[in-house]
Amino acid sequence: MISSDSGVLRLRKQYFVLAVVCALGISPASAKQPHCPSFKAYSDLIYLASDDLAPRSSPTPADLSRLEAKAIEIDTGQIKNQLVRMRVDPSRPYLQIIGHISKIHELAASLGTLSPSQIAARLSKSDIHKDLREARAFLDKFCGRAEGSKSGLGKIVAFIREGQLSAASSRASFLQSTIRLGALVAGLLAAIAALVLLNHLYRLFWANMLVRRSCEIPAQLEFSKTTIPGRIDTLGLRGFSFTFTTADGLAMAKTMRENQSVKLVTDAGTSVAKYTRPIKLQGSSAGFRFYSDLTRSALNEALALSVSPVKTQLKRRLQ
């Protein structure tokens, strides 16, 4: 009874293993002789020789003739071209393949004249088994490279590896794109910062060249026998900006023509200028240019009358 149960258990285990193998798409033949379209003729010869020339095997004359014929039919030039297409240095593996084919052909030819006992003795001493193991290792390594022809568990492993490589490649590509984008943004920001800095330096240069200062100096404008009160908001060597502080004065100023001459009167003295920049629609300031540039001493004397701190004026135009 125990023996019967053990037999049933063994039978169930065999069916379970067979079911798993079938689910993975692996058959006994495919496990023994992997599908290798990249080196089909060579693969068929190696796995056929592994069966027929195994230790303690007894190949028939027909088996040996078949091995000879398959060895002769192999196109070694095609194998070399396939290695090149797979981007493998063909020199070493190609010489190994030629050696395997030659040894199988010579051994099969020499065994054809021997008795079964002599064949078994010869095979037990031959080093062909080492060559066949080397050949199978080569096929295991390179078979899937060209077509990716794997089945069952081999497909699953290849899929996982390709997924890992694809994920790593995607991460590397994303990182490179991010770095390039960051470098581009940093370059644009640097260019904008450089332009802003250059513009500021340009304005500062001309503000110092013209000694243009913002201030609040009480003053009056005289033109057409009319006196208009107000204040100087910006003063430089070449001109000034004047703000009108009364509605009547602003209305009178809006009647001025461009280049009309006016007199600027402050406690520091009187200067003659011309009306150069009209009053803005919603504003109360206008720009004027001196007929003769002020001296630095006259400018400093006028700035001393400012009722607010004097600052460098960076605006390019008086208004």
Image: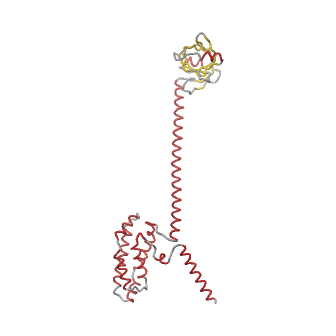
Picture layout, residue 294 above or below residue 23? above
Residue 48 image offset from top left, x and y in percent: 41, 79
Number of labelled discs? 0
- Display colour scheme: secondary structure
Picture layout, residue 162 above or below residue 184? below
Q: Residue furthest top?
A: 225
Residue 319 image offset from top left, x and y in percent: 57, 23
Q: Quadrant of the N terminus?
A: bottom right
Residue 220 image offset from top left, x and y in percent: 62, 15
Which residue is more in the foreground, 281 or 272?
281
Residue 247 appears in the rendering: yes
Q: Residue at x 51, y 68 (%)?
A: 155
Which residue is more in the foreground, 174 or 206?
174
Q: Residue at x 58, y 83 (%)?
A: 11
Quarter where residue 288 is shown: top right
Residue 33 placement, left or right of 10: left
Residue 294 appears in the rendering: no
Residue 217 image offset from top left, x and y in percent: 62, 19
Quarter where residue 266 is shown: top right
Q: Residue at x 60, y 19 (%)?
A: 242
